[in-house]
Image (cartoon, rainbow, N blue to C red):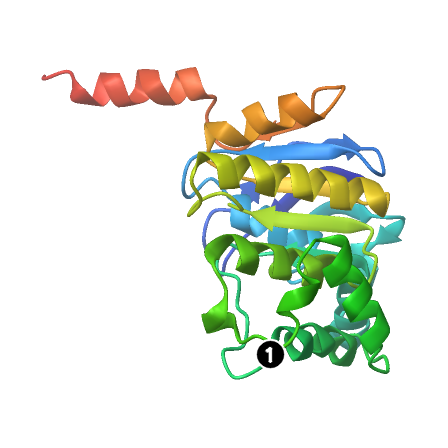
Amino acid sequence: MIETRQLQFAYGADQPLAFPDVAVAQGAVLLLGGPSGSGKSTWLALLAALVKPQHGSLTVAGQDLTALAGRSADAWRARKIGFLPQKLHLSAALTVQHNLELAFWAAGLPVNAQRVRQVLAQLGVAELAQRLPSQLSGGQAQRVALARAVLMQPRLILADEPTASLDDAAAQDAVHLLVQAAQGYSATLVIATHDARVAQALASCMPVSPNLLHLGPAPREAASSAAARRVPA
């Protein structure tokens, strides 16, 4: 679950970003949109306890994030957040198996090689365990990164532009995998994207519409503003 109230964050002396209040049930899906510079990356960073708000309240999976700092925030994040970044950040020098095992180190837990094999098998990539990232296709690398994201059975999965570099078929597959993985762990799923194909893929695999959060001006407002700026004086 995600609950925010009067949330604000500022970088240095910049004007604070003010975010809409949000209430998302545990296990639900939230589609996060908005133009570049609207604060999508900042909002994701707040949810992952990477930064702290200057104002307002923020609760994720029952945890008040304003009460976390330093190592306690790091430990909570490693165990409760699954992150699928746009750039997958798989270590080129390590096999798939060892890349996933790093997640246990980050969480301060002993390595569970059996759990790694289990998750890879669930996502249909068990045979890739001993390959290096350079030996993976784009779709395979996406599945490996998702396996890493769900390894700790997170309560929240954050996916940042998960379809940006994928063709239509792979994009639909990626969204379906995200939803299936989140449902399997009763995790809340947040997808930040500019890609209209994501909403289409969600509609094809979910019985109810996802929650929507659009940061910045509404799409029509943005279009009107852009049109106004193009009108000569």
Q: Quadrant of residue 131?
A: bottom right
Residue 192 placement (x, y as % from top left): 56, 41
**Considering the numbered disc 1 on the image, is that residue within a helix, a strand or a loop?**
loop
Quadrant where the N terminus is found in the figure: top right
Q: Quadrant of residue 209?
A: top right
Q: Which residue is mark 1?
A: 95
Residue 122 placement (x, y as % from top left): 77, 54
Residue farthest right in this picture: 62
Q: Is residue 57 visible?
A: yes
Which residue is found at the position 42% from the left and 35% from the top?
Answer: 35
Above or below: residue 230 compared with residue 132: above
What residue type is disc 1 on?
Answer: Thr
Which residue is found at the position 58% from the left and 28% from the top?
Answer: 201
Quadrant where the C terminus is found in the figure: top left
Q: Nearer the viewer, residue 96 or 189?
A: 96
Q: Nearer the viewer, residue 136 or 193?
A: 136
Q: Nearer the viewer, residue 70 or 97?
A: 97
Which residue is found at the position 55% from the left and 23% from the top?
Answer: 200
Q: Is residue 54 visible?
A: no
Residue 116 placement, left or right of 165: right
Q: Nearer the viewer, residue 192 or 70?
A: 192
Which residue is found at the position 24% from the left and 17% from the top?
Answer: 228
Residue farthest front in this picture: 127
